[in-house]
C-alpha cells in the first residue's frame, strides 16, 4: 500500500512536467462565459489555431482559480471587440475545462511576451 501511495505521488509531481508550453497569435473569434461548480470558466477560440490532443475543437480556457483570471478575461474581451491580435501561451493539457487547452498567460499589444 505504501508503494502505491508513493508511486501515485511521484506520478502526480512528474506528470505536469510533460505538459508542453505552446503559444499562438491571432484575433479572438469568439468566447464563452460559463460556470462549473464554484469556478467561473472562460473559453475562447483563436483564429488559425488547429485542434489537437485533448482539445478537439481548438478552444482554450482559464478558470477563476487562476490569479490572473479577471485580467485575462478583460484583456480577451477587449481584444475581441477591438479586433486586436493577442498572443496566448498555454499548456497542451485540458485540466481547466473539458476539451480546451489550459491558458497560462495572454499578451496584448506591442510588448515582448
Image (cartoon, rainbow, N blue to C red):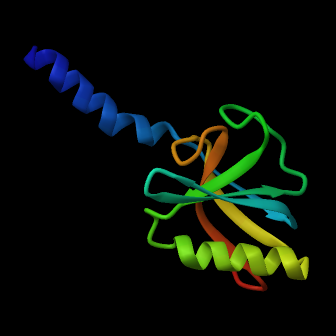
Query: Height in image: 77 above or below 53?
Result: below
Residue at 53 percent across and 48 percent down: it is 96
Q: Which quadrant is home to the N terminus?
A: top left
Residue at 49 percent across and 64 percent down: it is 64
Where is residue 44? Give x, y as percent. 74, 58
Say left or right for 39 vs 102.
left
Q: Quadrant of residue 24?
A: bottom right
Where is residue 105? Give x, y as percent. 59, 67
Where is residue 46? Give x, y as percent. 82, 58
Query: Height in image: 77 above or below 47?
Result: below
Say left or right for 12 vs 87.
left
For residue 113, say whether it is visible. Answer: no
Residue at 58 percent across and 79 percent down: it is 71
Query: Height in image: 13 above or below 67?
Result: above
Residue at 13 percent across and 16 percent down: it is 3
For residue 29, say whether it is visible. Answer: yes
Check the image and name the residue furthest to the left.
Answer: 2
Say left or right for 54 vs 66.
right
Name the one closer to the observer, 34 or 31.
Answer: 34
Amino acid at each position: 500500500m505504501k508503494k502505491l501511495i508513493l508511486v501515485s505521488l511521484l506520478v502526480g509531481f512528474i506528470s505536469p512536467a510533460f505538459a508542453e508550453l505552446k503559444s499562438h497569435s491571432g484575433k479572438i473569434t469568439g468566447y464563452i462565459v460559463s460556470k462549473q461548480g464554484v469556478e467561473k470558466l472562460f473559453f475562447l477560440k483563436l483564429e488559425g489555431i488547429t485542434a489537437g490532443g485533448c482539445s478537439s475543437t481548438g478552444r482554450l480556457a482559464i478558470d477563476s482559480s487562476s490569479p490572473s483570471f479577471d485580467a485575462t478575461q478583460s484583456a480577451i474581451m477587449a481584444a475581441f471587440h477591438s479586433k486586436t491580435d493577442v498572443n496566448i501561451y498555454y499548456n497542451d493539457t485540458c485540466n481547466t475545462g473539458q476539451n480546451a487547452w489550459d491558458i497560462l498567460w495572454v499578451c496584448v499589444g506591442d510588448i515582448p511576451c
